[in-house]
DNA sequence: TGCAGACCGGGGCCTCTCTCCGCATTTTAT
DNA sequence: ATAAAATGCGGAGAGAGGCCCCGGTCTGCA
């Protein structure tokens, strides 16, 4: 299902340049970064940008699919290295780090776990949701996680932890702290 | 420290009308609602709006101070009615509801618990932070809450829970669910 | 070498912010 | 009650920035 006709060399060059610049821009200015500005920084005309990516959402997704998929892969690595409970927590930590560091990704990861699943983000969100499901179920099977939580709930809570950590302006320590509070509970 | 000279009658009328309309607009369109539109809806010129509220932040705060203060008051009511642990949870629930329902308030409550305390929001955030401190300390004294959490951490987590609940698109059930998970912990 | 396909970036159109100053309304003094 | 002074009002319009289309130009590929 690749292009019937392969992309022309210059087209591919511009396409990739745009992706790279877009990722930087979204990370720096959030999901509302100026598209014209991205085009300019990539050294292409705005028309070129809009031809490759008809909508802002399209660009946002294209810029971060690989990162989302990397999260999916990472889940399996962690599952192979650590006991299920720890693997899950470690992975959630990485999800939170990604959410905070790459600001444009927040909305993507967010919409990946929203009820009204935007048809667009569903595609790449699946990888993350699948990873979460595997880790959660493994942890539950080992008795490391209460049995009555859904994978999607865990993802949503992770998003919440990321938000909370962001408020603290912490660069990572807060994430572990809040994840640990979430795991152990606020009761004594 | 009231006005040396009381506000002119028409000025006061406009001022209050603006506050009312602004609260609605922020609730509906989030914190980036168009200011000109607010002026129009209030039936005043934009000049009038900018004279009363030089910045967007000023208007946002003015529109919601009373609501923030109401949260502070509510904390004491709950503390009088319920045992400390329940009072805290019930209050956090109300904070979350406010965060979600009144979208413009999200940023206010958010900046009220941020590290780099914006001088502006500090003033009205104090009421909420004070309330949180009282409830948290009472709950800890009763042994209903682990002793090593700070009030500000609890507020941040509440903000996180609100965010997580928003993702679920739930109208309130999710909030209680997530608060309960947070309280009891994810461990079995 | 020809041409389909890609590029470029000016410009139209939009929305939003915020200022300015003549005019209207309220207040105060008589 | 009336006039003068003080104060606030309005809304046009400049300026900034964003989105995105279009048509003339260029380029990679067969």
Image (spheres, coloured by chain):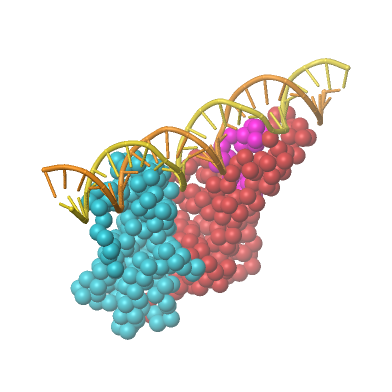
Chain colours: A red, B cyan, C yellow, D orange
Residue C5 pos. (x, y %): 72, 26
Q: Is residue B52 magenta?
A: no
Between A159 and B121, the residue placed more toward the observer is B121
Q: Nearer the viewer, residue A153 or B141?
A: B141
Q: Which residues are magenta?
A: A46-66
Q: How many marks?
A: 0
Q: Is residue A58 magenta?
A: yes
Q: Is residue A2 left or right of residue B185?
A: right
The residue at 54%/69% (across/down) is A170
Is B90 drawn above or below residue A30 in the view shown?
below
Magenta residues, dominant SS class: helix
Residue B10 picture location, percent across and down: 24, 48
Point out residue A114 in the picture as x, y percentages from the top left corner: 45, 49
Q: Is residue B99 visible?
A: no
Q: Position of residue A188 (x, y in %)?
A: 38, 80
Q: Quick check: A1 left or right of A96?
A: right
């Amino acid at each position: 299902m690749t292009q019937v006709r392969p992309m022309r060399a210059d087209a591919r060059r511009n396409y990739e340049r745009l992706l790279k610049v877009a990722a930087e821009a979204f990370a720096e200015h959030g999901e509302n970064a100026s598209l014209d500005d991205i085009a300019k920084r990539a050294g292409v005309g705005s028309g070129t940008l809009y031809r490759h990516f008809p909508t802002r959402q399209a660009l946002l997704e294209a810029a971060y699919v690989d990162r989302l998929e990397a999260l999916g892969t990472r889940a399996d690595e962690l599952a192979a290295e650590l006991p299920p409970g720890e693997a899950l927590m470690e992975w959630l930590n990485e999800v939170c780090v990604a959410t905070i560091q790459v600001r444009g990704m927040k909305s993507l990861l967010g919409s990946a776990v929203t009820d009204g699943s935007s048809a667009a983000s569903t595609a790449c969100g699946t990888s993350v949701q699948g990873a979460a499901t595997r880790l959660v179920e493994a942890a539950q099977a080992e008795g490391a996680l209460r049995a009555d939580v859904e994978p999607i709930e865990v993802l949503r809570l992770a998003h919440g932890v990321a938000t909370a950590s962001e408020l603290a302006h912490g660069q990572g320590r807060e994430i572990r702290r809040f994840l640990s509070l979430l795991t152990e509970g606020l009761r004594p």
